[in-house]
Image (cartoon, helix red, strand yellow):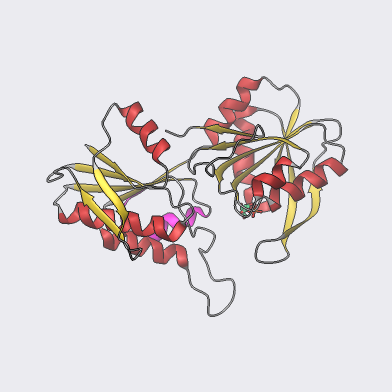
Amino acid sequence: LQIFAGNSNPRLACAITNVLEVPLGRAEVSSWSDGETRVKLEENVRGSDVFVIQSLCSPVNQHIMELLIMLDAVRRASAARITAVIPYYAYARQEKKTAGREPISAKLLANLLTTAGADRVLTLDLHAPAIEGFFDIPVDHLRATPILAAHFRRLGWQDFVVVSPDAGAVARADEFRRRAGGSLAIISKKRTGLETAEMLEMVGEVEGRDVVVVDDIVSTGGTLLKAAELLQERGARRIYAATIHGVFADHALERIERSPIEKVFVTDTIPLPDGVVTEKVEVLTVA
Ligand code: R5P
């Protein structure tokens, strides 16, 4: 078994190799002076079971190219089996056409990964589980909700409400509730623009109770902040969030810092932006 990693999430790659007690394979993954990606495996992989770890976080397209080129290098070096380990699968929110003349980018990415040489894919919490079916190779679709819920259970809260910020997120919130305890509330969210949303209504009682908003992705933070506003209006006490993928795009962390949200628990499928120091985010490893 040999493990290689691109440049997107070196800390997680290290954590995984530590857990497995396998050294990280040596490879040069850098750029040529014109910006093209350069990959050179420094180890023989002939006949090996090779895992390439790469989270498809920002800069997304660069990290995709790194992964594709690494897979190509491993395939051409005659590995026996190649698994692309993708803690965060990008373009997952572009998994269907919502209007005419749009692409299905999540499917295109699946095609590219297979063409590049992946024999199987291991990923976490795809935004749309149906993406698994975009591949004709095996996909191990792992879930991180148990990790977040177990952490929450250890906090020992007694009476709290698990909030789904969107009708589409109810299954995940309910799984969290079954594992961590508490009761369930559901907010109905309406998209008002490409990256903006409005919270319409909520089913469930939160007055005077602690709440934890459970979602798969925090990107601009708009969903969390709007949910927090509504929860505050409805008299919630402390507001927490538990999300799998911390994209934290577009100054989301600064907005969260200024918000009534006490803390966001997030996994390390995506590293926090460099230099960020915030007490409002607690990172749990999926290694
Ligand atoms: C939407 O369907 C997802 O589950 C997340 O709620 C959404 O992607 C979060 O994005 P943002 O932080 O930009 O509101």
Decide if residue 233 is on the left or right side of residue 117: right
Q: Quadrant of residue 242?
A: top right
Measuring 65% from the left and 45% from the top, which residue is drawn there? 253
Q: Give the answer, above or below, for where 103 lies relative to 86.
A: below
Measuring 50% from the left and 63% from the top, which residue is drawn there? 95
The percent coordinates of residue 217 (x first, y second) are 58, 48
Res 166 seen here: no
View extreme (front): residue: 33
Check if residue 274 falls in the magenta segment: no
Check if residue 132 falls in the magenta segment: yes
Measuring 61% from the left and 20% from the top, which residue is drawn there? 154
Decide if residue 20 is on the left or right side of residue 168: left
- Could you tell me which quadrant the C terminus lies in? top left
The percent coordinates of residue 220 (x first, y second) are 64, 53
The percent coordinates of residue 245 (x first, y second) are 54, 45
Q: Nearer the viewer, residue 182 or 199?
A: 199
Decide if residue 41 is on the left or right side of residue 185: left
- Could you tell me which quadrant the N terminus lies in? top left
The percent coordinates of residue 69 (x first, y second) are 28, 58
Q: Nearer the viewer, residue 24 or 199?
A: 24
Q: Quadrant of residue 50?
A: top left
Measuring 77% from the left and 44% from the top, which residue is drawn there? 228
Res 206 seen here: yes
Q: Give the answer, above or below, for where 106 lies relative to 124.
A: below
The stretch in magenta equals 128-139
